[in-house]
Image: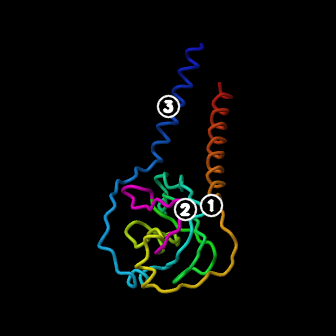
Amino acid sequence: MMLQKNCGTIALLFSIAILFTFFIQPFPASACSCARPLDTLTAKDLSAAVFTGKVLQVNERTDWIGLLSFWDKPVRGGFDVIFEVQSTWKGVDQQQVLIVTDGLGGACGIPFQPGQEYLVYASYWELNELETNICTRTVLKADAGEDLQVLGSGTVPIPSATLNGNDYLAIDIVIIISGGILFYLFWFQTKRRR
């Protein structure tokens, strides 16, 4: 009798695992390839935002919903980077701004470090978020002398509300708890039928 119960439990868990795999999308492999960099003024004209700022926070992004095979909206992995804006030339007028960058390696993301200062060239992605990558002229501010000379003096941003990079954590927790509740209810119903 005990062996039959254990086999039933194993079969149930195996069935759930198999069913779960039908909802997961494979991630296509991609390599980062950049065209020749644009000159400073062309890069500024084609960017949605150009500013210098200090990195306050870097948070890895996890878009679990994108793993579902039926989810057809674009999702974004990588990192959310919150900057304290020092000077701005285009597209940013507040003291803090959130910029998205892809994952590192083949995804062209920039390894932003908290406390470091950068000159950032950013554009909008499908989800209407400012993003940057290694194919732009984004660089450490200490290495941006030529760009800063061409850009001239920027403007100081106006005071604004502060951003919190942990806003996405609540969504992840809700998804995990919901999945646990559904699993428990399914398990409880199966146990009750015996």
Identify the disc placed on residue 165.
Answer: 1
Callout 3–callout 2 Cβ contact below 8 Å:
no
Q: Residue sitting at 68 percent across and 28 percent down?
A: 192
Q: Mark 2 highlights which residue?
A: 80
Task: Give the image location of residue 40, x and y in percent.
Answer: 39, 81
On the image, which quarter does residue 94 sit in? bottom right
Q: Crowding near pointer 1: few (<14 within 10 Å), some, many (20+)?
A: some
Of all residues shown, which one is farthest toward the left? 36
Q: Mark 3 highlights which residue?
A: 14
Callout 1–callout 2 Cβ contact below 8 Å:
yes
Eyeballing the image, is 130 above or below 148? above
Magenta part of the chain: 103-122
Q: Quadrant of the N terminus?
A: top right
* Nearer-N-terminus badge (3/1): 3
Q: Nearer the viewer, mark 3 or mark 1?
A: 1
User: In the depicted view, which residue is nearer to us: 93 or 69?
Assistant: 93
Callout 3–callout 1 Cβ contact below 8 Å:
no
Q: Crowding near pointer 3: few (<14 within 10 Å), some, many (20+)?
A: few
Secondary structure beneath label 1: loop
Q: Is residue 74 left or right of residue 59?
A: left
Type of amino acid under label 3: Phe
Task: Give the image location of residue 5, x and y in percent.
Answer: 59, 19
Secondary structure beneath label 2: strand
